[in-house]
Image: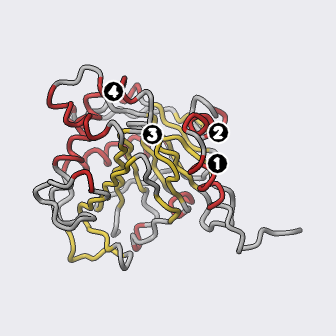
Amino acid sequence: MSTISEDIDLFTPLFKYFRRLPDINCFKEAYSIGTHPTLFEHCPITVTIDVDPSLGLQPITTWSLYSCKFSDGLYFLSNPFTSVGQRQWIDRCITIYPRQDKTNLGDNSNNQHLARIRWATLGYHYDWTNKIYKQDDHTKLPNELVQLSETIVKVISSNTNCPMMQPEAAIVNYYHINSTLCAHTDHSEYDALTKPLISFSFGNSAVFLIGGQTKSECKPSPILLRTGDIILMTGASRLCFHAIPRILSDPLLNDILYTNMDDNDKVCWSYIHDKRININLRQVYT
């Protein structure tokens, strides 16, 4: 029986394909509940917990959770946020979280260069050069981020095999329409690799590719992530290669976020209307 050579990169060709594909085709070809329903398995949510209203979440009884049949251990939670809640999280990402010195720009305490921000780290800070976390390089993770991630993971864990996790580090990524994120794995979390990684999307849509634990293992699968959507990587998917080849200008964003805005919210809209924000959280130590 023939085997796939370890030298064959099955990931990069699809990354380049979606990088060049017109927006309208990306929306059709990337997997979503609407376009590819047979690739997702609905997971009933039966747990009842108290949710802090400040988190901006809809009632848990309205949430829609799915396991992704194409990637073992990958879960997709269709936007559980209210429109007001989404705007609150976007506002935190552009007015609070980047006001520090752990950003791609270095010290951004005065937040005068928001348009140039590409990432900010919170909690245990990631050393991008050496690709490690350091125990002595740590600031307090915002309480609301801890509470949000613990709430989401508690709900998902109650009806799946997903383990609980203690959020200790966050990376906030700021994407422009022409931004990409190259294929990589998240493996710097020491002994916490059995713990899930949770990722929140706000703003314009993205094509998220997830493949195998090597680039030659399988062709990656494309998932469409819209504003408010959440993915959780655990099990085998936790160590899989993943990437963002494309940010898509979402025609639905205006209806979701702009409607019923007050003057304060319009500052948020002026930033996010042509951008995407991703917050990802993970446990670093056991």
Residue contact at pointers 3 and 1, CB within 8 angstroms: no
Q: Which residue is mark 3?
A: 205
Q: Earlier in the sequence, mark 3 or mark 1?
A: 1
Q: Earlier in the sequence, mark 3 or mark 4?
A: 4
Q: Is residue 162 found left or right of 258 in the rendered image?
A: right
Q: Earlier in the sequence, mark 2 or mark 4?
A: 2
Image quarter (top left, top right, bottom left or bottom right) of the C terminus:
bottom left
Rounded to the nearest whole Å, what is the CA distance between mark 1 and mark 4? 28 Å
Q: Earlier in the sequence, mark 1 or mark 2?
A: 2
Q: Which residue is mark 2?
A: 39
Image quarter (top left, top right, bottom left or bottom right) of the N terminus:
bottom right
Q: Which mark is residue 59?
A: 4
Q: Which residue is mark 1?
A: 70
Horizontal and vertical percent for residue 187?
A: 46, 70
State which quadrant residue 265 falls in: top left
Determine the residue positioned at 40% across, 67% down. Answer: 192
Rounded to the nearest whole Å, what is the CA distance between mark 1 and mark 2? 7 Å
Q: Is residue 122 above or below residue 230?
A: below
Q: Is residue 55 found left or right of 75 in the rendered image?
A: left
